[in-house]
Image: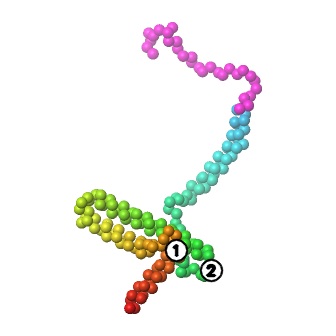
Amino acid sequence: MPADYDKGAYPEPPRQTPAVDKQTALPNPALILSKLFYYSVDLPVTTFRDAVDSFRANNKSVYYHQKFRRVPDLIDCQEGDYICYYEAEMQWRRDYKVDQEIVKVIQERMRACHQREGASYHQNCGKEIQQFNEVTKNFQSRYGDLGAYASGRKCLMKQKERMMAAAQAQSA
């Protein structure tokens, strides 16, 4: 503020904040309850959670990079070993999803090349088109015609029939 201001119109603010004027000598029950809750519930839970989080931070696994061990196929399972059947089925389903994603990625690459090259995509995207045709042919030969209720057992039977037909074609 300048030195020549009107002190009557603009009084100086107080130098210290005034103390709260307590009306009673009794303690505030809300303050007591909040402190009781903090020390009896909040503090122990928070401390426990922080301790658990510090242990987890050391061996933190990323959920989207989960690695599964390869399990035996259905042909390697003993007869009546239902746990092995289940594991092989789950392995087949994971493989099916991975193969679907591979087809999607290759298809996206082909579409991006088609978009980028425009009318001359046949000559400039030959590698992508050939790779897409190969991947879809392999996917169709393995998973095609399995129906809506596809399973590892149906896929194995289809593979067996394909192998028998190839052996018959070679011998004939």
**Residue drawn where x is 38% and y is 89% of the image:** 170
**Residue 84, relative to residue 8: is it above or below?**
below
Quarter residue 37 falls in: top right
**Residue drawn where x is 55% and y is 70% of the image:** 90
Q: Residues within 10 Å of mark 2 (few under 14, many from 20)?
A: few
Magenta-colored stretch includes residue 122: no
**Disc sitting over residue 152 in the figure:** 1
Between the residue at mark 2 and the residue at mark 1, the CA separation in whole angstroms equals 16 Å
- Secondary structure beneath disc 2? loop
**Residue drawn where x is 49% and y is 76% of the image:** 155
**Residue 1, relative to residue 61: is it above or below?**
above
The answer to whether 136 appears left or right of 30 in the picture is left
Q: Quadrant where the C terminus lies? A: bottom left
Which is more toward the observer, 143 or 17? 143
Mark 2 and mark 1 in contact? Answer it, CB < 8 Å. no
Q: Which residue is mark 2?
A: 80
Q: Residue furthest right?
A: 26
* Horizontal and vertical percent position of residue 80: 62, 80
**Residue 110, relative to residue 13: is it above or below?**
below
Magenta-colored stretch includes residue 28: yes
The residue type indicated by label 2 comes to Gly
* Horizontal and vertical percent position of residue 104: 40, 63
**Residue drawn where x is 46% and y is 79% of the image:** 159
> In the image, which residues are magenta?
1-30
Q: Residues within 10 Å of mark 1 (few under 14, many from 20)?
A: many
The answer to whether 66 appears left or right of 109 in the picture is right
Q: Main secondary structure of the magenta part?
A: loop
The residue type indicated by label 1 comes to Gly
Examine the rendering and report whether any part of residue 29 can be seen: yes
